[in-house]
Protein backbone atom coordinates (compact mmCIF):
# COMPACT_ATOMS: atom_id res chain seq x y z
CA UNK A 1 0.00 0.00 0.00
CA UNK A 2 1.22 3.49 -0.90
CA UNK A 3 2.47 5.53 2.03
CA UNK A 4 1.13 9.08 1.79
CA UNK A 5 3.39 11.68 3.35
CA UNK A 6 2.05 14.83 5.03
CA UNK A 7 3.83 16.91 2.38
CA UNK A 8 1.86 15.04 -0.33
CA UNK A 9 -1.42 15.90 1.38
CA UNK A 10 -0.39 19.53 1.94
CA UNK A 11 0.65 20.09 -1.70
CA UNK A 12 -2.52 18.51 -3.09
CA UNK A 13 -4.68 20.45 -0.60
CA UNK A 14 -3.12 23.76 -1.66
CA UNK A 15 -3.62 22.78 -5.30
CA UNK A 16 -7.33 22.12 -4.76
CA UNK A 17 -7.62 25.34 -2.73
CA UNK A 18 -6.25 27.24 -5.75
CA UNK A 19 -8.67 25.35 -8.03
CA UNK A 20 -11.51 26.45 -5.75
CA UNK A 21 -10.29 30.06 -5.73
CA UNK A 22 -10.10 30.00 -9.52
CA UNK A 23 -13.82 29.36 -9.93
CA UNK A 24 -14.66 32.50 -7.93
CA UNK A 25 -15.63 35.37 -10.22
CA UNK A 26 -13.82 38.63 -9.50
CA UNK A 27 -14.38 41.54 -11.89
CA UNK A 28 -10.79 42.64 -12.64
CA UNK A 29 -10.40 43.21 -16.35
CA UNK A 30 -7.47 44.13 -18.56
CA UNK A 31 -9.67 44.98 -21.55
CA UNK A 32 -8.37 42.25 -23.85
CA UNK A 33 -9.43 42.45 -27.49
CA UNK A 34 -11.85 39.89 -28.90
CA UNK A 35 -9.01 38.43 -31.00
CA UNK A 36 -6.77 37.99 -27.92
CA UNK A 37 -9.67 36.40 -26.02
CA UNK A 38 -10.14 33.89 -28.87
CA UNK A 39 -6.45 33.01 -28.69
CA UNK A 40 -6.93 32.46 -24.94
CA UNK A 41 -9.87 30.16 -25.64
CA UNK A 42 -7.81 28.14 -28.14
CA UNK A 43 -4.96 27.85 -25.60
CA UNK A 44 -7.45 26.70 -22.93
CA UNK A 45 -8.90 24.02 -25.22
CA UNK A 46 -5.40 22.80 -26.15
CA UNK A 47 -4.52 22.68 -22.43
CA UNK A 48 -7.63 20.65 -21.64
CA UNK A 49 -6.82 18.16 -24.41
CA UNK A 50 -3.19 17.83 -23.25
CA UNK A 51 -4.27 17.21 -19.64
CA UNK A 52 -6.88 14.63 -20.63
CA UNK A 53 -4.46 12.77 -22.92
CA UNK A 54 -1.78 12.77 -20.21
CA UNK A 55 -4.26 11.39 -17.66
CA UNK A 56 -5.23 8.63 -20.09
CA UNK A 57 -1.58 7.81 -20.75
CA UNK A 58 -0.81 7.56 -17.04
CA UNK A 59 -3.71 5.14 -16.66
CA UNK A 60 -3.09 3.03 -13.51
CA UNK A 61 -0.08 5.16 -12.54
CA UNK A 62 -2.34 8.17 -11.93
CA UNK A 63 -2.41 9.52 -8.39
CA UNK A 64 -3.26 12.99 -7.09
CA UNK A 65 -0.21 12.76 -4.83
CA UNK A 66 3.38 13.57 -5.84
CA UNK A 67 4.72 10.29 -4.44
CA UNK A 68 4.43 7.59 -7.13
CA UNK A 69 2.35 4.50 -6.50
CA UNK A 70 4.22 1.37 -5.44
CA UNK A 71 3.41 -0.47 -8.67
CA UNK A 72 4.00 2.59 -10.90
CA UNK A 73 6.12 2.45 -14.02
CA UNK A 74 8.14 5.29 -15.52
CA UNK A 75 6.49 6.60 -18.69
CA UNK A 76 8.82 8.02 -21.32
CA UNK A 77 6.54 7.81 -24.35
CA UNK A 78 3.50 9.69 -25.66
CA UNK A 79 3.31 13.20 -24.20
CA UNK A 80 5.83 12.12 -21.56
CA UNK A 81 8.44 11.84 -24.33
CA UNK A 82 8.30 15.65 -24.68
CA UNK A 83 7.31 16.94 -21.21
CA UNK A 84 7.88 15.43 -17.76
CA UNK A 85 4.64 16.83 -16.32
CA UNK A 86 2.11 17.18 -19.16
CA UNK A 87 -0.91 17.15 -16.84
CA UNK A 88 0.40 20.24 -15.06
CA UNK A 89 1.40 21.78 -18.40
CA UNK A 90 -2.09 21.25 -19.76
CA UNK A 91 -3.72 22.62 -16.62
CA UNK A 92 -1.55 25.73 -16.79
CA UNK A 93 -2.49 26.28 -20.44
CA UNK A 94 -6.14 25.71 -19.54
CA UNK A 95 -6.12 28.10 -16.58
CA UNK A 96 -4.07 30.86 -18.24
CA UNK A 97 -5.99 30.52 -21.51
CA UNK A 98 -9.38 30.66 -19.82
CA UNK A 99 -8.21 33.60 -17.69
CA UNK A 100 -7.38 35.46 -20.91
CA UNK A 101 -10.65 34.38 -22.54
CA UNK A 102 -12.75 35.79 -19.68
CA UNK A 103 -10.40 38.79 -19.34
CA UNK A 104 -9.74 38.23 -15.64
CA UNK A 105 -6.65 39.55 -13.87
CA UNK A 106 -7.80 37.53 -10.85
CA UNK A 107 -7.83 34.23 -12.78
CA UNK A 108 -4.41 35.03 -14.27
CA UNK A 109 -3.10 35.70 -10.76
CA UNK A 110 -4.45 32.35 -9.50
CA UNK A 111 -2.91 30.70 -12.60
CA UNK A 112 0.45 32.22 -11.63
CA UNK A 113 0.08 30.90 -8.08
CA UNK A 114 -0.62 27.47 -9.57
CA UNK A 115 2.51 27.74 -11.71
CA UNK A 116 4.53 28.46 -8.58
CA UNK A 117 2.88 25.61 -6.70
CA UNK A 118 3.42 23.19 -9.61
CA UNK A 119 7.10 24.20 -9.71
CA UNK A 120 7.58 23.34 -6.01
CA UNK A 121 5.33 20.29 -6.23
CA UNK A 122 7.30 18.89 -9.17
CA UNK A 123 10.59 19.46 -7.34
CA UNK A 124 9.27 17.30 -4.51
CA UNK A 125 7.69 14.79 -6.91
CA UNK A 126 10.92 14.39 -8.84
CA UNK A 127 12.84 13.63 -5.64
CA UNK A 128 10.38 10.78 -5.08
CA UNK A 129 10.66 9.64 -8.70
CA UNK A 130 14.48 9.51 -8.55
CA UNK A 131 14.21 7.26 -5.47
CA UNK A 132 11.79 4.93 -7.23
CA UNK A 133 13.28 5.04 -10.74
CA UNK A 134 17.08 5.34 -10.96
CA UNK A 135 16.73 6.17 -14.70
CA UNK A 136 14.64 9.24 -13.88
CA UNK A 137 17.75 11.44 -13.64
CA UNK A 138 18.64 10.64 -17.27
CA UNK A 139 15.04 11.24 -18.34
CA UNK A 140 15.06 14.57 -16.50
CA UNK A 141 18.17 15.68 -18.42
CA UNK A 142 16.52 14.98 -21.79
CA UNK A 143 12.93 16.18 -21.21
CA UNK A 144 11.62 19.58 -20.09
CA UNK A 145 9.54 20.05 -16.95
CA UNK A 146 6.48 21.89 -18.34
CA UNK A 147 7.51 22.45 -21.97
CA UNK A 148 9.68 20.58 -24.44
CA UNK A 149 13.40 21.29 -24.23
CA UNK A 150 14.75 23.33 -27.10
CA UNK A 151 17.87 21.70 -28.50
Image (spheres, rainbow, N blue to C red):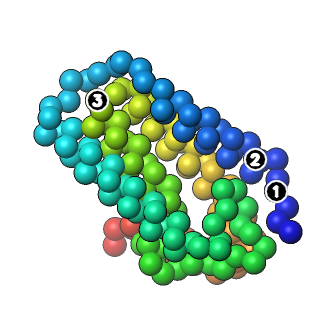
Residue 31 quadrant: top left
Q: Do the residues labelled 2 and 1 touch (CB within 8 Å)?
A: yes
* Residue visible at 50% across and 60% down in the picture: 87
Residue with the mark numbered 1: 4
Element at label 1: loop
List x then y, in percent, for residue 81.
45, 77
Task: Check disc 1: other Cα within 10 Å, few if <14, some if 14-19, many if 20+.
Answer: few
What is the C-alpha distance between the residues marked 1 and 3?
38 Å
Q: Is any part of residue 37 visible from this angle?
A: yes
Quarter of the image with the N terminus is: bottom right
Q: Which of marks 2 and 1 is nearer the N terminus?
A: 1
Residue linked to disc 3 = 103
* Disc nearer the start of the sequence (2/3): 2
Residues under labels 2 and 3: Cα distance?
32 Å
Image coords of residue 74 (percent x, y): 62, 78
Q: Quadrant of the C terminus?
A: bottom left
134 or 56: which is nearer to us?
56
Question: Is residue 141 or residue 93 the one in the foreground?
Answer: 93
Residue in view at x 46 percent, y 51 percent: 91
Between discs 1 and 3, the one toward the N terminus:
1
Q: Distance between the residues labelled 2 and 1?
A: 7 Å
Image side of residue 112 versus residue 59, left or right: left
Quadrant housing residue 46: bottom left
* Depicted 17 relative to depicted 117: above or below: above
Q: Name the residue under label 2.
A: 9
Residue drawn where x is 74% and y is 51% of the image: 8
Furthest toward the top, the residue is 27
User: Mark number for residue 72?
Assistant: none
Q: Circle 2: is it few (<14), some (14-19), or many (20+) Cα within 10 Å?
A: some
Amino acid sequence: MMRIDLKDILLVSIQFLFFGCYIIDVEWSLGFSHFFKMIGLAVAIIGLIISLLAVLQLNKNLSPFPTPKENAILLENGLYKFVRHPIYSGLLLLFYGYGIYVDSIYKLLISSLLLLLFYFKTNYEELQLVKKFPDYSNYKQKVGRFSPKIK
